[in-house]
């Protein structure tokens, strides 16, 4: 089995934290990013102290901060997104703009570092 370094955006959400737990359980190293605006650190309680996990709190719309913290990873699971219909209807343009900005920043760095990207948000 080839062990990988896996980057997960939106790691403090339900899906991101579940994926991180699964990857760590199978021996992989995980670097997780989240700004905690929608996710919760409590979702990471099972893995936060695991040596195979590193949590980075940051806003993916901040390209410089992302570049500074971007790991050497084999694959990136991009799960970060602002979702929820009530929030969307209140601030639709901000939501769309943020989601596009986050995705473009992650995609740009994945392309520069030859990191495979799995986009599912």
Image: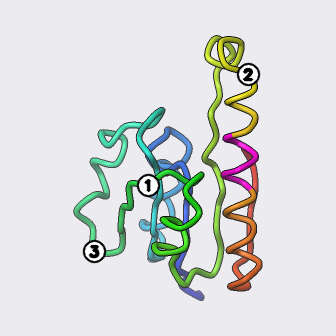
Give the image location of residue 16, x and y in percent: 53, 49
Q: Secondary structure at mark 1?
A: loop
Q: CA distance from mark 1 to mark 2?
A: 22 Å
User: From mark 3 to mark 1, how far is it between C-alphas?
Assistant: 20 Å
Q: Secondary structure at mark 3?
A: loop
Residue 93, magenta (yes or no): no
**Distance (Cα) linking label 2 and label 3:** 39 Å
**Looking at the image, which residue is at 49% across and 40% down?**
13
Give the mark nearest the N terminus, 1 or 2: 1
Asked where in the image residue 103 lies, by quadrant, the reply is bottom right
The stretch in magenta equals 98-103
Asked whether disc 1 touches disc 2, contact meaning CB atoms under 8 Å apart, the reply is: no
* Within-10-Å neighbours for mark 2: few <14, some 14–19, many 20+: few
* Residue, disc 3: 51
The tag earlier along the polypeptide, 2 or 3, is 3
Please give the name of the residue rendered at 74% of the width and 66% of the height, measured from the top-left corner: 107
Which residue, as the protein is rendered here, is positioned at the far bottom? 2
Picture coordinates of residue 62 (x, y %)?
55, 56
Q: Which quarter of the rendering shows the N terminus?
A: bottom right
Task: Label 2: state its secondary structure.
Answer: helix
The residue to which callout 2 is attached is: 92
In the rendered image, which quarter is residue 60 located in? bottom right
Comparing 10 with 111, the one in front is 111
| Image mark for residue 10 | none
* Disc 1: CA contacts within 10 A as few (<14), some (14-19) or many (>=20): some
What residue would you read off at disc 1?
58
Q: Nearer the viewer, mark 2 or mark 3?
A: 2
Which residue corresponds to the image point at 27% horizontal and 47% vertical from the top-left?
45
3 vs 1, front mark? 1
């Amino acid at each position: 089995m080839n062990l990988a370094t896996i980057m997960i955006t939106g790691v403090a959400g339900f899906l991101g934290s579940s994926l991180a737990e699964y990857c760590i359980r199978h021996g992989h190293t995980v670097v997780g990013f989240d700004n905690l605006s929608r996710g919760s650190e409590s979702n990471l309680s099972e893995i936060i102290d695991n040596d195979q996990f590193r949590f980075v709190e940051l806003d993916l719309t901040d390209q410089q901060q992302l570049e500074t913290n971007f790991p050497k990873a084999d694959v990136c699971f991009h799960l970060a997104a602002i979702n929820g219909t009530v929030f969307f209807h209140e601030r639709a343009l901000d939501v769309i703009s943020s989601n596009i900005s986050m995705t473009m920043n992650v995609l740009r760095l994945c392309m520069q570092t030859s990191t495979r990207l799995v986009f599912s948000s």
